[in-house]
Amino acid sequence: MYVWIWRHLPGPLAVKLGQVLLLVALVSALLLFVIFPWIEPHLPINKVTVPKK
Amino acid sequence: MTQTTEVAAPPPPPEPRHRRAGMSTGDKVRFVLRGFGQTLITLGLVVLLFVVYEVWITNIYAAREQKKVTKALIKEWQKENELALPGSADPTVPLGTGLGILYIPRLGRDYHFTIVQGSAVPDDSQLEKGPAHYKDTQLPGQVGNFAVAGHRVGKGEPFLNIDKLRSGDAVIVETRTYWYVYKVLGDPAGQNPQKAHSDVPIAGGGTVSLPGRVIIDPSQGQVLDPVPTAPGQGTDNSADKPAVPLMTMTTCHPKFTASHRMIVFARLAGAPVKNLNLTMPQSVLSLYDEVGT
């Protein structure tokens, strides 16, 4: 997959590297600010309360 | 010999690498394995990024929320409200707004969190702002049980180091009218609160034994009772017969998980000190010197 992406990026090496960094930043931002906040409440972590009797 | 090389025909151009047709079986196996490996590495990186999110990014958001509720609370307190008679603590604090400020000398002089009003069981949006009060439990200083939940890891992590508290350690709650000093249960002071107990009086005479700290199953809501029950420490018969003001803090245990809850019990120590001008009174300040922070 990564090889395929690298091969399809246009331009010389420096331009390709810039695009790769941009892609990584985009994917990270999507995960950190959209996907993780959405998925987190459904995960069995960080539950700090006990139920009312 | 160099001459023969010059006349030799150039080698045929290599096959384009991305043409999958004509792949040998070995190539196909390598192709699939490589894809599998790359997927696993990607998933690993995503999980690492999730850890970064949990322990770092959520704290940034939570700190912002905490700052907002603290500012609003201080502003509210600074309003001279003639109608609020001393001691008539407003029992109807809107959900998600501040009701008091928590200080724990053992956790440092810079440790302070505004406690927000939570639902009957505080929800995520309230807990993100700060430690949240279980609405149906008592308010600070009242006879019964003032119960507060807080995050252990991420989301501001107010209760990250709650396990560092020893028996007798002060847990201070500032309200508009009073400073309340609770002390973690367990005799004698300085013990591991999980192994030390205190006898807590109940109405109509008698006492119940409570530890300073206990790890419980997530379903054991009886720790919120006016007279809480630590699992394996007697029965529920005394639940509604409180005689003294207690405080209960709940958080997750072990860190990061939902498998258990860590509970810390404390009892009001001494008479509350009037909150004159929203500055910490000397008697409360001296509690910091006791633990050397």
Image (cartoon, coloured by chain):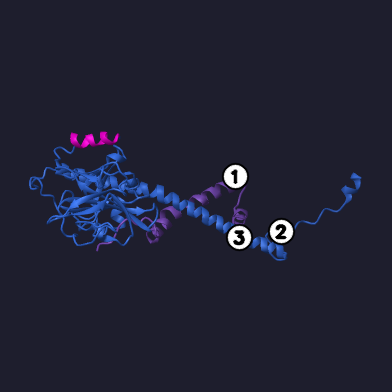
Dot 1 amino acid type: Ala
Q: Which chain has been coloured purple in this picture? A: A
Whether label 1 touches label 3, CB < 8 Å: no
Q: How many other residues sit within 10 Å of disc 1, few (<14), some (14-19) or many (≥20)?
A: few
Q: Chain B in the picture: what colour?
A: blue
Whether label 2 touches label 1, CB < 8 Å: no
User: Was residue A36 drawn as part of the magenta stretch in this picture?
Assistant: no
Of residues B205 and B116, the one drawn nearer to the viewer in this rendering: B205
Dot 2 amino acid type: Pro
Q: How many other residues sit within 10 Å of disc 3, few (<14), some (14-19) or many (≥20)?
A: some
Chain under numbered label 2: B
Above or below, B74 against B26 in this view is above
Q: Which residue is mark 1?
A: A14
Q: Secondary structure at mark 2?
A: loop
Of residues B235 and A8, the one drawn nearer to the viewer in this rendering: B235
In the rendered image, is residue B280 in sight?
Answer: no
Q: Secondary structure at mark 3?
A: helix
> What residue span does the magenta drawing correspond to?
B280-292
Chain under numbered label 1: A
Residue B75 percent across, percent down from the top left = 19, 43
Residue occupying the point 30% across, 47% down: B193
Chain under numbered label 3: B
Q: Which residue is mark 2?
A: B16
Measured in 3D between alpha carbons, the distance from the residue under mark 2 to the one under mark 1, in whole angstroms, is 24 Å
Q: Quadrant of residue B86?
A: top left
Q: Secondary structure at mark 1?
A: helix
Residue occupying the point 54% across, 55% down: B42
